[in-house]
Image: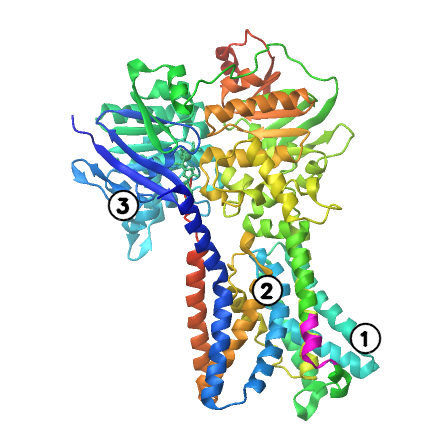
Amino acid sequence: MAQSELVKKHRVRELLVALLPIAALAVLFGALCLVVNIKGYRLDMYLKIVFNEGVVLAIVATGAIFIYSLGSFDISLGASTLFSATIGVMVYNASGSLPLMILTIFGVAIGCSLLSSVLASVFHIPVFVTTVAMMSVLSAVAAQIITTNGGALGGIGIPATVVAPLDNVPFKLIALAAFALLCVFVFDFTKIGRRLKFLGSNAVCAKLSGIKVNVYAIIAFVMAGLGVGLGAFLTLVYTPSVTPTTAGSIGMNILVAIVFGGMPISGGSRSRIYAALVGGFSYILLNNILKIVIDSGAGYGISQIVSAVFFLAVVYVTSMNYRTKLLPR
Amino acid sequence: MEPILAMKHIRKTFSSTVALGDVSLEVYPGEVRGLIGENGSGKSTISSIAAGMQKADSGEMIFRGKPWRPKSMIDALQNGVGMIVQESGTISGVTVAENIFLAELGQFKRLGVIDRKAMNRKADEALANIGVKDVRGSTPMAALDFQTRKLVEIAKVVMKQPSILVVDETSTALSQTGRDILYGIIKRFREEGKAVLFISHDLEEIMEVCDTLTVLRDGARIRDFKKEEFDPDAIRTSMIGRELQGDYYRSDFTPSRLDEVALKAEHLQSGSALKDVSIDFYRGEIVGVGGLSHCGMHTLGKILFGAERPDSGRVVTADGTKITNETVAMKQGIGYVAKDRDVESLALNTGIRDNIAVAGMERYAIGNVLITNAKEKRYADQQIQSLSIKCAGRDQLVSQLSGGNKQKVVFGKWIGRGSDILILDCPTRGVDIGVKKAMYELMTSLKKEGKTIVMISEELPELMGMADRLIIMKDGVIMKEFQRSEDLSDAEIIRYMI
Ligand SMILES: Nc1ncnc2c1ncn2[C@@H]1O[C@H](COP(=O)(O)OP(=O)(O)OP(=O)(O)O)[C@@H](O)[C@H]1O
Ligand SMILES: [Mg+2]
């Protein structure tokens, strides 16, 4: 075969691989419409659910890309979403100030993230170890605050009217787009992003190329904290109350979402912001489809299993695409 | 005579790259066959197909009269073809013994538990068998340097007594003692009527070691040379397809430098590797540092770049800045080409462009922050062009490049950013003569621009050929300093090494 023909064939294959996650998103969207239709549910209601859940997951996952690109991961992101929302509610109820609440949420979210990464670098332990500890501590403290203050209601909240003006599609879309753009900018158009990706590819070589490993780990965690803050705020906009289970599964879901979006969990140069956006919505779509198909009551466990099988399948297929034969030459 | 191994019409492509067009190759009993050719000519590819590391697209192989279709390297080794690979063929997280017996831990199982004592003892034997006495089976692999890791790999392969031994560009990772061990093994193979396929870019070495030579160029077999036909110029010419003009090393024999110190090492002390080492490096000077592998010169390179901290003593630049880490070193214009290329100098699963760009972003970042694709591409392309890196495109993964082209990427990374002081640890390892010549020319022109080059090398000829001043180390101590001169004799220099 002629050289140019080979090149062409190769390019086409690479393009197809890149488009796969988007195709999956489209298929899942079609599937949701289909099952909703078959079951005779209201499509607009489901679209609203998917949109609201998807926006939050996509935002938190987008921030988390910075951590994942390092080949590291943070399991406490769900817990810190819950925690910062909880503190935000407490601050609003004490002060009655919305701006103060927003500031608090972001402050707490970034604080949690910073704490994970700084602890890891001080004690020289892998950062995901500290995030496991953070997860337990944060969700326990949040649950404690919620049960002491929420009493019989099982949750605490702010008056719905406070955030009602923001509970609409344009606002959330703008929030998502603004954050995604910020992340794309930092990730793809600054030295910071390049260095994070390189660090994820080979930390030893990165260090020998003058990249300060600890500094960049902290930057990554701060970016993730920003996403958590925004996600926590939008969670409150959607449902102005928090319970101990709010955002509980986000930490794990991000992992699945990012893989759905076509990014290797090992991070490195193939890290992409759009993986979080595409994957976040794909994951929520799949989740809702499974919830509808498998009868809700007894189905919780089953839908988890189906989702896990799906996850493994996707990991397998995507890893086939980026796995290159590493010849020790 | 029947060949032990006959490879017929082997073709191998990697997506858009044709690594081997249609190559046939035979190896006969008692023969040491050399494979020589430019970087990317297909040497590693053809030999790794024989050794089961990868499969050909088409073609067939006959080994000892039977069709040969190894399923893996382990399968090949167990059935008579062993290979020592170009880069690291060992795993660093485990012990020496575990590396040697990786595929057959089962044989040491007693009641389901691995008998480590027995395994370590066997490993000691395997190492002693090739003449390595100072490494134990129980030693963690990570504690060993590059050369010793190579020796462990050799022990592992030779222990299985293959009929054919493939040695891919290994000798340049070894110092003289290691090489002697390797040559001894090759001699044994020849005497026992087995065969060796030997790959090297060192023409003198390959002419010395081999009985026949096969030249590859661009994935095709160009020509064979019998021992009596060996002639450096003819071999070179058939390798690159044209005559190589001019001098290989520097043509002048007078040491020269600017009267300005660029970097000072003061009383460096580091474990047993360095003992009170002080050196001044001048602008416009090429300083060669030589010695045996363990003499401390590799540690010296790391410390000069701030990648390792000395126990005491310090490294300072001309303006008094103390080099404490890599970031400071780079701010001071220091660049470092590490010896362990695949681990320390490159991110393998990443594109050429990213690898080149990572050290040079301040060269084209707007406001030292903003990166645009266009500028970055231009920057990477410049290096790819000026070093003529053979690749399918700037975004090709570095793991897919041939050994020499990987090294060029590393050079591009440090030269592109305009380093004023370059610390080069075994810079021409695995690099073909054409590229070597280009690198030497580059070093000479950098010298003329007033830059400082510290060349740490295990190759005496290149040290003698290039350095203004040659520092010989032994056991962490500077034994002797030689000035550049026509009358330098390698015999005398070696006396200070051993
Ligand atoms: N896994 C791979 N993917 C893509 N291309 C590859 C791969 N392995 C080898 N190649 C290409 O095949 C060609 C031959 O490579 P090979 O490693 O055999 O060269 P070589 O003669 O050993 O060179 P060197 O002297 O630099 O080691 C090169 O162009 C290389 O880029
Ligand atoms: Mg090779």
Between B364 and B69, the one nearer to me in the picture: B364
Amino acid beneath label 3:
Asp
Residue A328 lies, with reference to residue A145, above or below; the image says above
Residue A303 lies, with reference to residue B138, above or below; the image says below
Residue at 70% x, 69% y is: A109
Q: Chain of mark 3?
A: B
Q: Chain of mark 1?
A: A
Q: Secondary structure at mark 1?
A: helix
Which residue does the numbered mark 1 point to in the structure image? A99
Calculate the distance from the C-alpha at mark 1 to the C-alpha at mark 2: 28 Å
Q: Residues within 10 Å of mark 3 (few under 14, many from 20)?
A: some
Pointers 1 and 2 within a single chain: yes
Residue range highlighted in magenta: A166-175
Q: Is residue B96 visible?
A: no
Spot occupied by residue A78 in the image (x, y as percentages of width and height):
61, 72
Which residue does the numbered mark 2 point to in the structure image? A74
Spot occupied by residue B287 in the image (x, y as percentages of width and height):
62, 21
Amino acid beneath label 2:
Asp
Residue A131 lies, with reference to residue B26, above or below; the image says below
Lower position in the chain sequence, tag 1 or tag 2: 2
Which residue does the numbered mark 3 point to in the structure image? B75
Q: Is residue B126 visible?
A: yes
Horizontal side, residue B466 vs residue B23: left or right: right
